[in-house]
Image: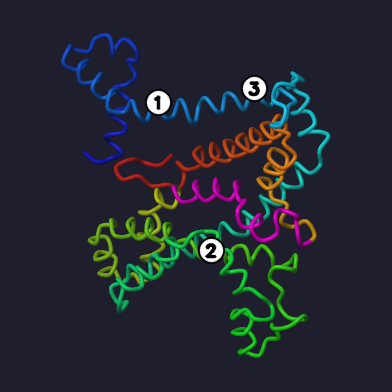
Amino acid sequence: MDFGSEIELARRSSSGGLRSILKMSPAKRREARWGLFFISPWLIGFLLFYLAPMVVSLIFSTYNFTLSAPDDAQFIGLSNWQRMLFDDPKTWESLFVTLKFALISLPISMITAFMLAVLLNSKHLLGRNLFRTLFYAPTMVPLIAAILIWSAVLNPQTGWLNRVIEFFGIPAVGMNGLRWMDDPNLIYIAYTFIGLYGIGNAILINLASLQNVPTELYEAAEIDGAGWVRRLWTITIPMVTPVIFYNLVLSIVGLLQFFIVPWVLNRGNGYPEGTTNYYMVYFYKQAFTFQNMGYGAALAWLMFIVALIITMFLFSTGRYWVYYSGKQRS
């Protein structure tokens, strides 16, 4: 029985709900109790460190209080939400900046990670194990250190990236050259470069999925005369769409929470020209710099709602393009 059939069987077996639980034999009940016992650390951790803080933050969003004077908190109802949605243009400006960066960075990072995984999975690549190690190694570097390294790499005067471009005859070095961190038209590409430095995990996940594609499919395609591009498009990509979907969801959620890079490089001041006023930077400044925790909680919930809507949309459309073995797509 394949994975898709097991899921369908589990769905049907759970349709009885409470009635099926009450009809369980003593042995099955004992087994269920032991199962709950072994997963209880996770359940307790989820309730204490995830669900409870979310409920508390929702309550905080209806109060006006600061960390320096928590006893002076005042209940103001939905005033924070009204201010956030209708009276504060910076909320939507920062959300627009975040979504704009995501639209630029997401396809570049997804395609790069996948194509590198395809390359590293090729049997014709010499030193595959070495290259796999080298591509994954940057993920072991602390993120702060990686950001500082890239700020030096992208330096318009001394950065080696501009010097390599200059070598090909394109003016890049100097005040009139490519100023990656100072030009509003280049800043998102620069931040995408920094993000590509840590795609080792995505490469590893894609590589694992590529190695699980049945080899007989490729052999049959070769017999039929299909070329490499044809095999990639009709066999490889459809077979790994569950992993592509998984990486897509994680990448979108991560990009919506994009914070550390702009904060380390310019302390969230929006330079250049407000192009780095990301949503999470604005949330951090409201909640912890200005200590307006009630308004910060409302901002956090708005981001949660946006991420939830996008995720639900992806899951609702995933059945049309994500292929699961043994299960027909709608």
* Image location (x, y in percent) of residue 263: 66, 54
Name the mark on residue 284: none
Asked where in the image residue 177 lies, by quadrant, the reply is bottom right
The residue drawn where x is 44% and y is 47% is 246
Report the predominant secondary structure element of the magenta stretch.
helix
- Image quadrant where residue 62 sits: top right
Q: Give yes or no for residue 268 being in the magenta stretch.
A: yes
Region of the chain picked out in magenta, as a range: 246-272
Which of 103/16 is in front? 103
Q: Which residue is mark 1?
A: 44
Tell me the crowding category of disc 2: few under 14, some 14 to 19, or many 20 or more residues within 10 angstroms, Cα based.
few
> Which one is nearer the viewer's eye here, 80 or 7?
80
Q: Is residue 330 above or below residue 9?
A: below
Structural distance between the alpha carbons of marks 2 and 3 = 37 Å
> Left or right: 189 with respect to 124?
right
Q: Nearer the viewer, mark 2 or mark 3?
A: 2
The residue under label 2 is 145
Q: Amino acid at mark 2?
A: Ala
Q: Residue 133 placed where, x, y %?
A: 35, 68
Q: Is residue 76 magenta?
A: no
Taking the spot 53% from the left edge, 63% from the top edge, the residue there is 145
The location of residue 221, given as percent across then percent down, is 29, 65
Q: What type is the residue that disc 3 sits on? A: Ile
Q: Considering the numbered disc 3 on the image, is that residue within a helix, a strand or a loop?
A: helix
In the image, taking residue 105 as reference, residue 226 lies left or right, namely left
- Residue 158 occupies which quadrant of the picture? bottom right
For mark 3, what is the residue?
59
Q: Nearer the viewer, residue 103 or 281?
A: 281
Type of the residue with mark 1: Ile
